[in-house]
Amino acid sequence: MQLMMYLGNDLIDSIPVNDQDLRVPGYLGKFKRSLKEKYRSLITTTEEPIEFLVCNPTMQPEIPLPEDNIPNPTCE
């Protein structure tokens, strides 16, 4: 799992977190505080809100194939 910090639509940083500890009070808070401190000068120069997202970037959503089970050609 990764804790990702965004400013607007821009990914600023991500750090690995242990998914077993996500329910521990304050676990994510300490990482959020350290990221806010690390990027304090960047945060103060923008009006964009800070957002945090926790996800597993290795998981890929299943995209259903068309009815003929042939993937659509991609642009090259």
Image (tube, grey):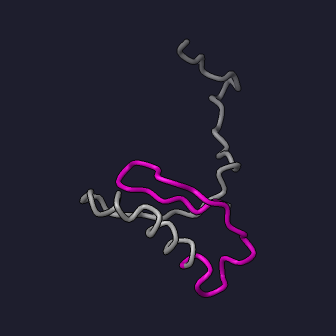
Front residue of 67/60: it is 60
- 4 or 76: nearer the viewer: 4
Task: Name the residue at the top extreme.
Answer: 76
Give coordinates of residue 35: x percent, y percent: 50, 66
Task: Tell me residue 15's x, y (percent).
Answer: 62, 60
Quadrant (top left, top right, bottom left, bottom right) of the N terminus? bottom right
Residue furthest to the bottom in view is 25
- Residue at horizontal 56%, vertical 78%? 30
Residue 4: image quadrant is bottom right
- Looking at the image, residue 65 lies above or below residue 10: above
> How far across and down, in percent of the image, does residue 34 sit?
52, 71
The image shows a total of numbered marks equal to 0
Is residue 45 rendered to the left or right of residue 68? left
Vertical relation: 72 (above or below) 41: above
Quadrant in which the C terminus appears: top right
The span shown in magenta is 2-29
Q: Residue at x 60, y 16 (%)?
A: 73
Q: Is residue 73 left or right of residue 50?
A: right
Identify the image quadrant of residue 55: bottom right
Is residue 22 rendered to the left or right of residue 11? right
> Could you tell me which residue is drawn at 38 percent across and 64 percent down?
50
Relative to 66, does residue 45 appear above or below in the rendering?
below
What residue is shown at x 57% (from left), y 56% (from top)? 14
**Residue 20 shown in magenta:** yes
Residue 65, compared with residue 38, is above or below; it is above
Question: Magenta segment: does it hold 33?
Answer: no
